[in-house]
Image (cartoon, rainbow, N blue to C red):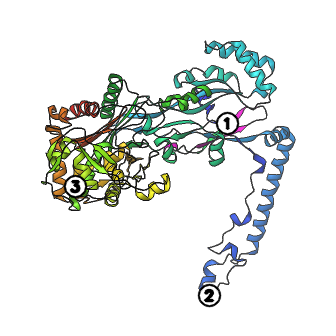
């Protein structure tokens, strides 16, 4: 077993050091300096007691001097005599050792840190495997045949002829090393002791392979690792071609924390290739573990609920994100379709790699943070807040809705534009307008109509940005989109068109050019759940056992308690009797808001966002179904998730 351990090292980055090049010890390294500055050029003058304390010379008797000289020359004579004996008797042996021994230093790759869910489930880990490596230039043809025969007996799926041809091909190309068997498990590596003892030029090289036990479940959060590319090698000097590096998600953004530090292992190698000595030069530093805020069971349930909806409604893509409204922690994060990060870690063929990128439903696209969609009626929560805070309307004032409004063209009074509601709601106040999602009510308070003042696009834009729409959060775990808050300046610059009242009406109900990500919608919803604080969403709980840092509030007191109470009660009424009433059967009180978005070229997008329990919110759930047709379909996804969560 010692021989097995002796041969166990990692990496092929050997630094060859001749022992003859080791420097001699200089005199100044051993002579006493009593604290003098070596670089000063001369020793300082000593005076009085200081001189007596530090002087080296003391008076000695003449006999002592003679005795000292005698002993000194006797010692020198003895050393010279023994040296002459060694030179004559064993000179060839020692000359060979000095001339032929060399030191090789190998890097031993560290184990990459684990990624762990909030409830302690390991969702990304590293497995140690071994590659059986030979130095082909050291083998004769007969040795190569014998080696191939011995190895083929240990690995039934590898033929003797294939192994022999590998060695011969490596010899013809003058390769320093050739991997004969890849990815040997630790158990199987233990059975190689006999063959390792037999062949000095056969070695095991250890490496770490990333593993994702839950396959695609966390794909869009943690990303994946893959072998370093040529571009990576140009940018990072401490990697080689056998290393893996984070390419996406947390694996990418926390690469420095996760990767650890190589250890160094030194070997003394004879000219025949035999190992005559070895030692560990530098300890391996394992990578830091990263713990997430994601709850594993909630993540499982959220993906299951979304996948059920895609299958039932025959749609192809969607997203679910759940937050803790009290601090912005992300509790669940699902984007479908997704991908298996193990595919990238194991290595993909060029064809399979291209299929991921050319897939029309974009499995690598993170819809939670990168997907930009018109928000639909979920924007009405912010429009209502702005109207209340700006005193545009009182919460109890009624507006009569008839299913549409007609607005004459500013260019031709004979031309009228009609803006529709999804039904005639009659007279509604703000709470009722939120509950039934009246478009006419929000046209009116957004852009003004029939004598009622509206917010106007400037104030609408201001409040949307206060809720971080049109901006990124500065996430540290993945790419994010800012969305779009359209303004007259934007329209003129991008479309070369003037802003119209119709544009303001469209923004007021979440249609037209307005765009938001599911994470932006969820974060805005959390403001109404927690009493007015906009948190920066985060998915990192700790790195290396250390807390990720203080919670980051983007803004506090975004709305008054009065405004908050009105919007919250409207969301609660939406569940009791309005557009989200399918949730009224849940075991705890829930508040929510639906949204349906007109999408070009096909079915509408469907939104739901809400929180629970109503009195003391613990969770915000936001659902987006691309081409989901009706917001009720998104509500059903939220129902499945919240029913499970509230029943725990």
Earlier residue among tags 3 and 2 = 2
Q: Residue furthest bottom?
A: 48
- Magenta range: 258-276
Q: Residue furthest right?
A: 88
Q: Residue 266: x percent and y percent?
A: 65, 41
Q: Residue 37: x percent and y percent?
A: 65, 75
Q: Is residue 271 magenta?
A: yes
Cα–Cα gap, marks 3 and 1: 79 Å
Q: Which residue is mark 3?
A: 450
Task: Name the quadrant of the C terminus.
Answer: top left
Residue 347 visible from this viewpoint: no
Q: Residue 344 falls in which quadrant of the image?
A: top right
Cα–Cα gap, marks 1 and 2: 62 Å
Tag 1's secondary structure?
A: loop
Tag 3's secondary structure?
A: loop
Which mark is drawn over residue 48?
A: 2
Earlier residue among tags 3 and 1 = 1
Q: Residue 135: x percent and y percent?
A: 73, 29
Asked if marks 3 and 2 touch (Cβ < 8 Å), the reply is no
Q: Is residue 599 above or below residue 470?
A: above
Question: What number of labels is visible?
Answer: 3
Q: Residue at x 62, y 46 (%)?
A: 238
In the shown orientation, is residue 80 left or right of residue 199? Answer: right
Q: Which residue is mark 1?
A: 12
**Depth order, front residue of 637/63:** 637
Residue 364 visible from this viewpoint: yes
State which mark lies toward you, 1 or 2. Answer: 1
Tag 2's secondary structure?
A: helix
Dot 1: within a 10 Å radius of its alpha carbon, few (fewer than 14), some, or many (20 or more) residues? some
In the shown orientation, is residue 175 left or right of residue 380? Answer: right
């Amino acid at each position: 077993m010692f021989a097995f351990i002796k041969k166990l090292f990692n990496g092929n980055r050997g630094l060859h050091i001749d022992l003859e090049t080791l420097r001699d010890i200089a005199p100044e390294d051993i002579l006493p300096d009593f604290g003098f500055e070596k670089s000063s050029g001369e020793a300082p003058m000593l005076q009085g007691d200081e001189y007596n304390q530090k002087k080296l010379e003391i008076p000695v008797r003449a006999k002592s001097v003679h005795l000292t000289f005698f002993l000194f020359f006797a010692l020198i004579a003895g050393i010279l005599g023994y040296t002459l004996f060694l030179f004559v008797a064993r000179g060839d042996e020692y000359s060979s050792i000095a001339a032929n021994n060399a030191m090789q230093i190998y890097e031993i790759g560290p184990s990459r840190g684990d990624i762990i869910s909030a409830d302690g489930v390991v969702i990304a880990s590293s497995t140690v495997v071994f590659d059986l490596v030979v130095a082909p230039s050291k083998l004769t043809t007969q040795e190569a045949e014998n080696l191939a025969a011995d190895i083929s007996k240990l690995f039934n799926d590898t033929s003797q002829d294939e192994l022999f041809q590998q060695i011969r091909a490596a010899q013809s190309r003058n390769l320093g090393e050739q991997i004969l068997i890849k990815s040997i498990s630790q158990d199987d590596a233990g059975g190689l002791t006999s063959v390792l003892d037999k062949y000095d030029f056969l070695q095991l090289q250890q490496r770490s392979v990333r593993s994702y036990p839950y396959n695609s479940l966390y794909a869009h959060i943690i990303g994946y690792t893959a072998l370093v590319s040529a571009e990576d090698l140009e940018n990072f000097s401490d990697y080689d071609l056998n290393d893996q590096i984070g390419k996406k998600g947390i694996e990418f953004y926390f690469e420095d924390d996760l990767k650890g530090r190589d250890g160094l292992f030194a070997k003394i190698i004879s000219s025949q290739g035999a190992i005559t000595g070895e030692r560990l030069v530098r300890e391996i530093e394992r990578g830091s573990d990263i713990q997430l805020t994601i709850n594993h069971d909630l993540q499982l349930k959220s993906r299951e609920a979304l996948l059920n909806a895609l299958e039932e409604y025959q749609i192809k893509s969607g997203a679910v994100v759940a937050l803790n409204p009290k601090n912005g922690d992300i509790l669940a994060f699902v984007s479908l379709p997704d991908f298996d990060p193990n595919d990238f870690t194991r290595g993909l063929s060029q064809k399979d790699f291209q299929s991921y990128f050319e897939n029309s439903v974009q499995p690598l696209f993170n819809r939670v943070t990168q997907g930009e969609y018109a928000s639909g009626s979920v924007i009405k929560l912010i429009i209502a807040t702005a109207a209340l805070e700006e005193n545009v309307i009182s919460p109890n004032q009624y507006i009569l809705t008839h299913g549409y409004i007609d607005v004459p063209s500013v260019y031709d009074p004979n031309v009228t534009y009609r803006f529709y509601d999804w039904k005639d709601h009659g007279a509604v106040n703000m709470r009722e307008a939120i509950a039934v999602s009246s478009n006419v009510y929000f046209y009116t308070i957004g852009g003004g109509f029939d004598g009622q003042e509206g917010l106007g696009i400037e104030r609408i834009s201001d409040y949307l940005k206060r809720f971080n729409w049109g901006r990124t959060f500065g996430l540290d775990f993945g790419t994010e989109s800012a969305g779009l808050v359209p303004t007259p300046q934007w329209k003129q610059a991008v479309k070369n068109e003037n802003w119209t009242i119709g544009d303001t009406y469209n923004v007021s109900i979440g249609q037209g050019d307005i765009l938001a990500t599911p994470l932006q919608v969820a974060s805005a919803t959390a403001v109404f759940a927690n009493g007015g604080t906009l948190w920066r969403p985060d998915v990192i709980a700790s790195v290396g056992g250390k807390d990720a840092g203080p919670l980051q509030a983007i803004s506090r007191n975004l709305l008054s308690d009065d405004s908050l109470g009105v919007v919250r009660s409207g969301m609660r009424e939406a569940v009791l009797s309005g557009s989200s009433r399918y949730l009224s059967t849940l075991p705890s009180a829930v508040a929510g808001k639906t949204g349906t978005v007109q999408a070009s070229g096909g079915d509408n997008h469907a939104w739901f966002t809400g929180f629970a329990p109503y009195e003391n919110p613990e969770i915000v759930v936001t659902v987006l179904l691309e081409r989901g047709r009706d917001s009720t379909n998104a509500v059903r996804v939220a129902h499945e998730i919240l029913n499970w969560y509230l029943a725990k």
